[in-house]
Amino acid sequence: METAAVREVADRLLLAYEKGEPTAPVIETHPDATITDAYRIQQEQVRRWVSDGDVVKGHKVGLASKAMQQQMGVDQPDYGHLLAGMFHLEHQPISAASLLQPRVEPEIAFVLGRRLSGPGVTVADALRAVDFVVPALEIVASRITDWRISIVDTIADNASSGGVVLGSKPTLLSDVDLRLTGCSLQLGGELVATGAGAAVLGSPVNALVWLANTIGPLGIDLEPGHVVLPGSMTRAYPVSAGDTAVADMGELGTVTAVFTA
């Protein structure tokens, strides 16, 4: 894609955020767009958010589990940026109206204590870099009409990022086996899904390694204090005003998101 086309799509997605109205799939308006083009569109939006005063506070890996890949009709992970404005406090009201087509996903969030700079990051490097983990609920949202997304669309749309709620119980990696960590997801007091850490590329740590080695060649490092969401342990479930989502991860604790009008 030409630079002008990249900016045009970024403008369209940013307008969708502003007006709360989805836009047509990128792959329909620009059928020759590639994954590289999609990341250029994403970076253009991030550049503008930062220039407007927001701050990058981490990254997310999307579509890391087979359940999510099947649900979204894609066959590989992607990544997006987490901006400070996307973080919400647990148990505090989140305006459902401020999100387009929101869904929730339970994830194990990494909080980094050391910089990770790829390529060449190993599992050992990743383990040393993690300060602690907390339970998290990612809010995914799509600026694409009816979630009609290809891999190009979701990447261009900042990996369908909407928000994140972090739990408040930190756990050291030495105290837990993330592969075996189970999760139950409740909406409105009803159990809707169960999952385990192994659903995320075999282990959430593998997603962290993948992320560091994927963004490293682009000149992006994972910084101390940053949050990394490695991917959902279950399918994503729609939420709306009046819903309360609770993810229970056993020894990792619980995390709750409350959605209001």
Image (cartoon, helix red, strand yellow):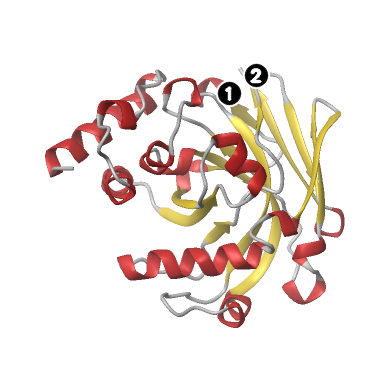
Sequence-wise first label, 1 or 2: 1
Residue at image location 26% in from the left, 26% down from the top = 29
Q: Calculate the distance from the C-alpha at mark 1 to the C-alpha at mark 2.
A: 5 Å
Determine whether 151 is above or below 77 in the image. above
Residues packed near mark 2 inside 10 Å, few (<14), some (14 to 19) or many (20 plus): some
Q: Are dots 1 and 2 in contact, CB under 8 Å?
A: yes
Quarter the C terminus occupies: top right
Q: What element carries label 1?
A: helix
Residue 63 picture location, percent across and down: 56, 47
Which residue is labeled 1 in the image? 96
Residue 138 picture location, percent across and down: 61, 43
Query: In the drawing, does residue 227 fall left or right of residue 214?
Result: right
Residue 124 picture location, percent across and down: 61, 82
Residue 241: give its label: 2
Residue at image location 74% in from the left, 59% down from the top = 198
Q: Which amino acid does label 1 sit on?
A: Ala
Is residue 89 in sight in this rendering?
Answer: no
Determine whether 220 is above or below 255 in the image. below
Query: In the drawing, does residue 109 fall left or right of residue 224?
Result: right
